[in-house]
Structures are given as structure tokens and as C-alpha cells.
Amino acid sequence: MPRAKGPRQAAALFAALLTVTVLCAGDAVARSYPFGPRTRSVNDLGNQYVPYHAHLWDLLHGRADGGLFVNWQSGYGASFLPDLGTYLTSPFALLVAVFPRDEIDLAVYVITVLKIASAGAAMAWLLLCLRPGRWWAAGLLGASYALCGWTVASAVYNLMWLDGLIALPLLCLVGEWVLNGRRPLLGVLVVAAAWIANFYTAYMATLAAALVLLLRLLLSGLPRRRRFTAAGRAGLTVALGMGLAAPVVTVVYFGTTHASPGRFTQFTPVATEDLLARLLPTTYSFGSPALYVGTTALLLALALPFHRAAPRQVRTGWTLLVVGVTLSLQWGPTQLLWHAFTPPQGSSYRETFVVCALLVIAAWHTLSYGPPDRRALGAAVAVLALIAAYASRSDLVRPFAWPVLLTAAAGALGGLALLARTDGRPTAGTGRRTGPAVVAVLLLVGTQLGEATATSAVATRMRLGHMDDYAPWGDRREQQAEAIAQADGWPRYRTDPGREQTVGNDPLLVGGQGAQYYSSHTSDILFRTLTALGGGWTSGGRSLQSLDNAVTDVIFSVGARVHSPPDPHQNWFPQDGSRVTVSRQDVPPLVTVRPSAATARTGVSGFGPSPYRNQELLLGTRVYNVPRLTVRTSTGKPPYRVGGERPGVRIGAPNPGTAVAKPTITARCPADSEVYLWAPHFAGTARLTGDSAHGLTGRFRSDPVTKIAAMQRLGTVPASGRLRIELSPNQTGSVPDGAVGCLDTARLHTTVERLKTTGATDVTVFGATIRAKLPAGTAGTAGTAGTAGTAVIAAPRIAGWRCATDGASATPAGEYYGLVAVPLSASATSLTCTFHPPGLRLGMAVGATSLVTLLLLCTLTVVRRRRATKR
């Protein structure tokens, strides 16, 4: 017979209220947004998730360039459905629509808090389904799970992971329904919702729920046949649910296969003392598993093996499961299993929430059989003391952790001891019994509130010292957005948000259409194309930057470019009162016609080592003079040459505090040409000396592994033709041969006029389709020796583009040095290209099959029940 839902609802509400209280209190103590001046937009939260939610806001309000299939604002045209499935398919994400656009940071914060509160409520509901018990205790432990170390240290700024935090207890609840033969349709829908919301953490949560169900089957005492039947139902439920989610999952999968490879580190397990340290409150690090669940929950979980009121099989089974899964965090093969056999880029312990959930469920099994007696509680305290003693060897246990731990341990022990005194005895009608019970509850709740608030506040403060951070929406972004809106001319030309980026996805946040793009699905072809053209990137190639270059602006039809002062939040330069400006450039349309059909088969592999020559290949004309260089160190001597992957000359950083001359580069170029410096592995600043520099300073940012610097414009060559560049390195780096390019702007202008003459007369972009009208006879004129020309679209040739001319059948697009290309007949006058996300058709087919199967099974079930009723 189903249990009453009243206690479950009360427990869920109590868990949610506790969770919200702690999160807000922790941010208030840390003086973090929105309760203080410190930003909470660290790392990918500021670079990716806030901008993607801003783009979702634009989509929902009809203001975005593109639709569900193509994002025309990022990476000169990127596949959007994989990003949608990775970052924005949680139902909570839709809440951004009710907030003002300039309050996008607050919208993301509210969504984050609601997700964590929902996870606590879901866990509280699950606990009462697993075992009957006190509703307030289930709520308390539900909040312990929601506020675990993994949440407050790692997931609070990776808010799509929080969908996995919600999914795990819900999937375990599906396992309970399967075990009892109830709610088959709802179970499938829950699985589908979990995998659609965030398939990455849903995968981990599904593995964890499977382990919980297997243990429940072993402990159920059911006949073997019924166990196998239940396991079969579970497998079918998961398969159908994943099948319904296939349209999202397959698109994300194929998006990953076409993505830039990134930079992945080999897994190395953390030291045992660091692993144990993360069980304690107020410990923090980026690269270790945050196992904290609260001292009360930890003591209860540690007491389970010694709690004689619980059956031996229950004590043994849950203890072994917790220990086994914890050890799986420290072994390479099981780490790969938890991460779907793909090493993560960043933290290696993204599955830690699974261990936190198992600790909380183990704690509930202890408490549900009655509060632990003195023997069990004493043994738990002894184990906790051993853990703390061994963890004290870790640098992660800072001095302030000890008073928090001791206070929390005292409160938890006092509350559990008082609770044991009233357990099994009537409390109503006598103050002597009610008093200790109330005090016990207050002690346990107060302990949870205090230590969880402290742990959350410490994590929030320490993140700012360990990670890059970004300011919330403010005056700088208001100015950028206003300037872009006034200059915007899409699709006649692009408006680039500018080289001085605020975050890694500026186009999504402030508008425009640029090269900037930061995603797990940044395409490999875009990465290789922009790198070959002199572009810079961070995050191992997943975060591509804007390239402020006149030639690439012509190639990609960037007719307006925003120029912002360096972001004062990053402390690059003091604020000097400069404001956002916009420069204009005459550029050809998005669709141009090139002179040879053979170029349609030329891929990125056709590029050479020089970005200046590579730009000329795409442009179709020589416009650069690449002079021989004379490089001198700060002592005036020739530098050492270096080889390997970064050939060139070595530029060393000066010793701190020493006043020395600067390294220099000298060369000769035609007077009045524009000077560019390409030094991808140089970190520091470069300045062209002389009046012709116009005050320009190139800032180069690189490191040995994760980032390279973009090409920079430094000024114009003086009348003498001799240029001199002073370098100010921040660290040892290198300058390659052919680092300087001098642009002939007159020749570039002539090329632009030619491309405009033969380019499309009209270009329209609607969602994932681009249409262009070509001047009559253009293709034939562009061809050589009787051959037709090639239409080139200023967009990366990512997988999924299909094109047709003059209404013919669409075929896969060709490639012109990384861009979309279409061979033209001599009489071609129109072009239509449409993007189809790879994997979508397969996903739709699998989803439709799963839906039909589910409907048939539901129909069969209804028919059987009706026949049984008639009998």
C-alpha cells in the first residue's frame, strides 16, 4: 500500500528552504553577488554559461541572429543545437525569459539556487520512499546532499551539472517504481527529462541509480525471477527514456566528434590525506573530490556498520557500496567509466556528487532504524577522529577548518544523543519528552546551517583567488551593446564585438557577429582555420578570440568593429576615461565568387606556416610584405634560436626589479603600410616606436599549454621605411621567423572592389538557410580557361552544410580553405545553402521508435488491465 505523501511533501519543502537559506547566507557572508560587491562569475560561468543564457533570452524574445540550428553570432556561424543540448535544455533555463536582459546574471543566480533547492527536495522525497522515518530528518539530509562539497565548490558555477544533482535522486526514485511495478510511463519520462536536461551528468546519475537498484534488489528478499524481471523493467525504462532523449543526445555526440580536440591531462589520483580532507567542512581545492556532506550526515554514515538496530545485510551492503564507489574515484579505468570513457578537460572528479548521494542515503538508513546508540555513535566519532587526524597532513585543511569541525561535531553529537533519548517514547502531552526532542532538532538544524554556510562562503571566496573572474553586466557591456546595435548591419556585413573581449563569448552577451566562440563544441575546422590566419585562443583551443585584422575582416565581411578599452575588472590598465568606439571598413558581401572550381576541393590542409600568406590564399591576392627581421635581446645580442613545435628566437623575461633595455625587432617595409606582429608564443606587450604608431600597444597572452596569442596591429611604417618594435615580455617566450607583416592597404582596397563586383547582389539569412543572388555571368567571368567559378560563403565549413544553385538538388557543400564553397556553372544566378545538424535525423528516428514502442506498451498494459477487470 502506498505511504502517505504528506511527510514527503513536508520533507521536500523543508530541504528546499534549508538549501536556499544556506546558499543565500553563504553568499552574503562572502559578500558575493547579488549580496555583495564580489562577482560570482568565475571561469566558465562568466565565459560560457551566462552568455549562453543571454543568447537563450534573445532567442525566446526573437532578438537573436540565427535559430535553433545555427548561431550566426559566434565563430562566424556555429552549429547551435549541440550547445543548446549541452548548456540550455534544462527546463529551469527557460526562466531567463521573465528577467530583464540586463539582469542576466541575477537570472542565472536564481536558476542556480532553484536547481540546488530542487535537488535537496528530490533527495528528501527519495529518502522517505526508501525507508519510513522522521520528515524533518529526511529534509535535513536532503539539504545535506544538495549542499554537498561538490555543489558549493564545483557545480555552483557549472550550473548545467546541477541537473545531474537533481537527476540522481529522481532516477533512484524510478528504480523504486520499477522495483514495485509502479508508474512505468512516468519512469520513462523522468529518464528522458534527465538525459535531455544534461546528458553528461545524467549518464553518471544513471550509473549511480543502477548501483542503488542492484543493491536494493539484493536486499529485497524477492525471488530470483522477480529480481530479474525488475532488472529487465529497469533496463527497458532506461532504454526507452534515452531513446526519447536521442534527438538531443545524438546531436551533442556528433557535435563533440567534430569539435576541436582541446588539451586533456592524464588522470592522477589525489593523495589519501587530500581525499579524506574533502570530507571535512570549509576545505577547498579545484582538483580533488569535494566529498563534504555535513558532519551530521557523515557521522550517521560512519555509524551504519556499527548500528545493531539495522539488519546486517543493510549495514554491509550500503557500507561496501559507499566504500567501493569512493575508491573508484581514485582508479584510472573506473574514472574513465564515470566520464563516459572521455577524459574531462578540467576537474577530474565531476562524478563526486554520486559519492555524496550514497553517503546521505547510508546516513538515512542509519537514522531510519532509530538514532544510533552510544556504541555506534562512539565508533563513528572514533572513525571521524582518525579521518581528521590523517587529513591534518593535507594542505587543504586550513586553520579555520578546525573550529568549524569541532563546533559542528559537538552540535551533531549533542543533537543525536538527545534524539536517542526520545526515540521510541511518547513526546506528546509531556514537556519532559517534547523539550529534548525540540532541542535535538534545533541543534541538528543549527549545526547544518552553520557549517554549510561556512563551507559555502569559504568556497565562494577561495574560488576568486584560484580562477579567472568576470564582472557582471554593467556600464562596459551597456556601452558595447549600444554601439553594436547602432552599427549592426547583418547580414549585409558583420559587426565584430572587438579584440578587447570582456568574456569568451562576447557576441552572445553584447551582440554582433564575430570570430569569438567558447564551447565544448568549438569546431575543429574553425579552430584550425583561425589559427592558420593568426588568431589566438585559450582553453586548449576551445575558446577562440576575435582577430583585429583588416584582411580577415575583408575575408569574413566584418564591416564594423567595436574597439573597447581594456577591461578594468581584469586590471590590465588603469581606467583612463576612454570609451567604446566603432570603426568601419568597406568589405565584400557574405557570398563572393572565386575564379576556379578546383578551389572548392582545397581544405585547411592547404595552409602553410605563415598566417600572412594564408590570409592571402583566402583573399586571392598578395597584399603583404613579409620582411626579414633583426631581433635583439635586452643586452643588444642576437637571441638563441629554438626549434620543436615553437620555432623561432627565444625572448627571455627580465629579472624582477632590474632596469634593462627592451628586446627589439627591426625590419624594413614600404612606407605607410600597416604593421602587424604575429607572435603566438609570446606573452607581454609590443609597441611600434615612433610617431606613426599612433599610441597602439599590442598585448599578447600565451602560455606553454592552454593559450596562444593573436596577431596584433601595431601602427604604420614611417616614411623612412624602417620600423622598430619594442617588446616587453612577461615571461620567457619566442618570436617566429616571419613574425612581421606589412599590409599594402591600397592593394587591399582594390581587391575589395573586385570581390564586391563579382559578389552576391543580395544576401538573405533566415535561421539555418542563407540565400544569395549572383550577378548574371559572374561565374563564367570568374572562371579561367572556360571553367566556372566557385561561390564562397564567409562561414566555416562545419559538418552539415548542403547547398544548391538555381533550384537544383542540394548536395554537401565543398570547402575553400576552411570556408563553405559551392562550384558554380557558368549560368548560375542564385545559391541556397541550408545547415542540417549532424545526428539530428538519427536522433529523430531513434526518438520516434522509442515513442511508438512506449505507446504500444502503454496500450498493451491498458488492454490487459481491462481484460483482467472483465474477468
Image (cartoon, rainbow, N blue to C red):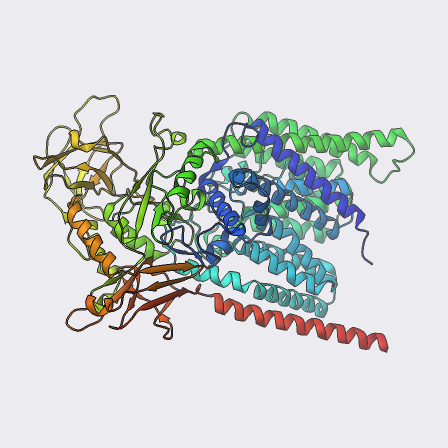
Location of the C terminus (image quadrant): bottom right
Instruction: Place residue 196 in its image quadrant.
Output: bottom right
In the depicted structure, whether residue 853 falls above or below residue 131:
below
Identify which residue, 157 or 831, lies in the foreground: 831
Instruction: Give left or right: position of 541 versus 70.
Output: left
Instruction: Place residue 835 in its image quadrant.
Output: bottom left
Instruction: Give left or right: position of 117 versus 487.
Output: right
Instruction: Give left or right: position of 696 versus 855.
Output: left
Instruction: Place residue 836 in its image quadrant.
Output: bottom left
Q: Is residue 307 visible?
A: no
Residue 473 percent coordinates (x, y): 48, 36
In the depicted structure, whether residue 256 falls above or below residue 370:
below
Identify which residue, 777 or 852, lies in the foreground: 777
Residue 609 percent coordinates (x, y): 19, 52
Location of the N terminus (image quadrant): bottom right
- Residue projecting furthest to the left: 720
Residue 504 percent coordinates (x, y): 40, 43
Residue 28 percent coordinates (x, y): 59, 28
Q: Is residue 802 visible?
A: yes
**Which residue is rendered at x = 80% and y = 31% of the image?**
438
**Which residue is rendered at x = 26% and y = 73% of the image?**
827
